[in-house]
């Protein structure tokens, strides 16, 4: 993620505007973590796909109450106010459409031009809160070979929701607040790729590669252990890949150790070995694994001190 998780007000790399108007929004000029990661991954032979929270610094989806600097007394977030002030001074307005335009032309454009070919692809979350056509134009101009996807449409989704703008489906499962990603409800995503033409789904004559973006845990970025059985993960992933589609695992971070979750990495490696074995044996055989429904555990409420 170039943005810090689903928050459009925080980024892991310096930015000429954000670093000035809200210092805590970026690491400043001290270090460019994204550039370091992208360079290392590509050198090791990996493709770099960038996650971006399309709501931008104005928090169009989650609102001020979810900003990192929200003040409960004033009910405001300085980071949002700073950004809106900048946008109004530059564009003459800070209405929603202008905020969407500024996000694309100020935030995304600088990163897209800086990293260029170091970004093999983009995945824009809650994309209905952004100007998709403008984002597409800016990113493709910075790197014509980059691929793009926009999270906007009904869930679960393996459908060409943005013909002409997306190169691969955003592949978001049923919302995790309802079921874990391994639920039978999401089997239709695998089946959609299997029914496709060589892995591509067409809409208005435009192709989009069938792609699934799956979390491992009960939550996108945290959890005690994978909700998937290794058998199911290997089966669904193998079927998707055998049909010509693509699969992305969202691997959570262990914030205490400041590294990818060791359990998740171990699970992912085991699944990868299983997928290779299935391929060597001639591809998926027999009935598809139906999946299993797991509801997310309820959070324990903190008791108020008397």
Image (spheres, rainbow, N blue to C red):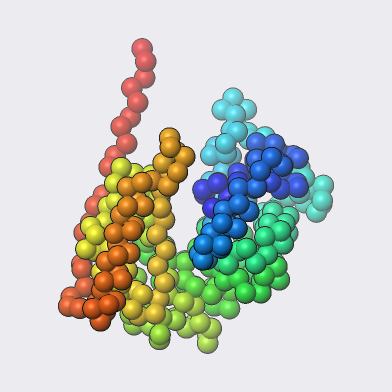
The correct choice, above or below, for 158 with respect to 33 in the image is below
Q: Identify the residue shown where x is 36% and y is 75%.
A: 241
Query: Which image quarter is the C terminus in?
Result: top left
Residue 81 visible in the shown view: no
Is 32 or 144 nearer to us in this picture?
32
Is 211 or 155 nearer to us in this picture?
211
Is 258 or 106 nearer to us in this picture?
258
Residue 16 visible in the shown view: yes
Task: Pinpoint residue 87: horizontal percent, then vertical percent.
Answer: 76, 49
The residue lying furthest to the left in this view is: 286
Residue 210 horizontal side relative to residue 150, left or right: left
Q: Identify the residue shown where x is 80% and y is 54%.
A: 91
Task: Pinpoint residue 102: horizontal percent, then vertical percent.
Answer: 72, 55
Task: Pinpoint residue 176: horizontal percent, then vertical percent.
Answer: 35, 52
Task: Pinpoint residue 193: horizontal percent, then vertical percent.
Answer: 36, 77
Residue 274 horizontal side relative to residue 26, left or right: left
Q: Identify the residue shown where x is 60% and y is 33%.
A: 69
Picture quadrant where residue 26 is located: top right
The correct choice, above or below, for 134 with respect to 64 in the image is below
């Amino acid at each position: 993620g170039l943005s810090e998780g689903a928050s459009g007000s925080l980024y892991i790399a310096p930015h000429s505007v954000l670093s000035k108007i809200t210092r805590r929004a970026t690491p400043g000029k001290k270090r460019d973590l994204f550039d370091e990661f992208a360079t290392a991954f590509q050198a090791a032979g990996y493709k770099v796909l960038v996650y971006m929270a399309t709501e931008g610094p104005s928090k169009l989806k989650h609102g001020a109450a979810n900003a990192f600097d929200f003040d409960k007394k004033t009910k405001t977030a300085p980071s949002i106010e700073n950004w809106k002030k900048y946008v109004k001074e530059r564009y003459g307005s800070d209405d929603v459409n202008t905020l969407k335009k500024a996000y694309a032309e100020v935030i995304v454009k600088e990163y897209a031009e800086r990293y260029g070919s170091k970004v093999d692809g983009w995945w824009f979350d809650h994309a209905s809160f952004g100007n998709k056509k403008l984002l597409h134009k800016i990113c493709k101009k910075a790197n014509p070979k980059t691929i793009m996807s926009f999270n906007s449409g009904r869930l679960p989704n393996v459908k060409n929701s943005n013909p002409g703008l997306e190169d691969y489906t955003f592949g978001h499962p049923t919302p995790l607040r309802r079921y874990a990603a391994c639920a039978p409800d999401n089997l239709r995503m695998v089946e959609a790729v299997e029914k496709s033409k060589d892995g591509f789904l067409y809409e208005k004559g435009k192709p989009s590669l069938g792609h699934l973006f799956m979390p491992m845990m009960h939550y996108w970025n945290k959890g005690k252990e994978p909700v998937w059985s290794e058998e199911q993960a290997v089966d669904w992933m193998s079927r998707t890949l055998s049909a010509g589609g693509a699969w992305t695992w969202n691997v959570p971070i262990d914030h205490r150790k400041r590294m990818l979750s060791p359990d998740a990495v171990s699970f992912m490696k085991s699944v990868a070995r299983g997928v290779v074995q299935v391929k060597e044996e001639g591809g998926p055989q027999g009935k598809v694994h139906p999946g299993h429904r797991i509801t997310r555990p309820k959070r324990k409420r903190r008791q108020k001190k008397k």
